[in-house]
Image: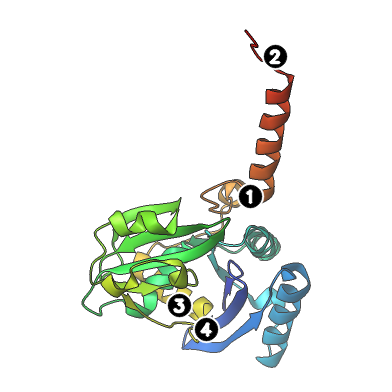
Amino acid sequence: MTLALDASQPSGSLALGSATGIIYAASFDIGITHSETLMPQIDHALRFCGYQPRDITRILLANGPGSFTGLRIGLATAKGIAYANLCPLEAYSSLQLAALPRKACGKKILTVIDARMKEVYAALWDEDLQMLREPSVCLPEEIMAWDVDGAWLVGNGSHLIPDSERLIPVDTSAYLSAAGLFALSALHATPAEYDFDYLAALQPFYLRDASAQIKSAEKHRLAIAKTIPTDTR
């Protein structure tokens, strides 16, 4: 049995799949309480379907970019289960996952995730989900310099993009993202095996430092600047 998890966004989701297909899928509002929400949701899904944690033989994970808290807790949870069950863990881009609903729809796909601090995480894909523009963190207006005319616009940061008349906004809020991880796994077709060293080294795909780290660095810079004598000549 495969467990798929997406805790990278404020609205989380999970899915369970067997050899016959997806047997359970659900979404839940996790906000900033990922640690209080994720494990009970997994436990409920397993019990509802008549499984136990030891029955999980593979894990699929949306590994960022996204919420720093969600990414850390999602990966820690996935690693914990993988270590306990000696099963493989496959990590995928949250930006590519967000583009999945528009796959094979005849246009490029621009995915945009709200990064806070007036910035967004963004990437551009062709209709087959091949990368045209690498994931980056930038100001929303900077994206309009990309070759995005006529592209589908998806992701929870879509509303932040100016001049959206050059794009085709798509509401994917009802999309159960964790279930889409099964399609990404099939798309990448990379057989996974349990690998302790890989799991130990695997980190969330942050794309930038956390806002707290950025603010701390700026505070430190200003403190140092105050200690530097000013030339009053």
The residue indicated by pointer 4 is 18
Q: Name the residue under label 2.
A: 229
Give whichever of discs 2 and 4 has the lower sequence position: 4
Q: Residue furthest left?
A: 106
Mark before the other along the chain sequence, 4 or 3: 4
Identity of the amino acid at label 3? Answer: Gly
Q: What element carries label 2?
A: loop
Q: Nearer the viewer, mark 4 or mark 1?
A: 1
Residue sitting at x 67%, y 86%: 45
Residue 132 is at least partly visible in this image: no
Q: Which of marks 2 and 1 is nearer the N terminus?
A: 1
Determine which residue is flagged by label 3. 180
Q: In which quarter of the image is the C terminus?
A: top right
Query: As rendered, which of 138 and 46 lies closer to the eye?
Result: 138
Residue 149 is drawn in which quadrant? Answer: bottom left
Q: State yes or no: discs 2 and 1 in contact (Cβ < 8 Å).
A: no
Q: Are marks 4 and 1 in contact (CB under 8 Å)?
A: no
What is the residue that sits farthest to the front in this orientation? 233
Q: What residue type is labelled 2?
A: Pro
Compared with 97, 132 (above or below) is: above
Please give the label number shown on residue 210: 1
Q: Relative to 219, does residue 7 appear above or below in the rendering?
A: below
As displayed, is residue 138 above or below residue 172? above
Under tag 4, what secondary structure? strand
- Distance from label 4 to label 1 (Cα)? 36 Å
Answer with left or right where residue 14 lies relative to residue 187.
right
Q: Which of marks 3 and 2 is nearer the N terminus?
A: 3
Observer-side mark, 2 or 4, equals 2
Q: Is mark 1 on a helix, strand or loop?
A: loop
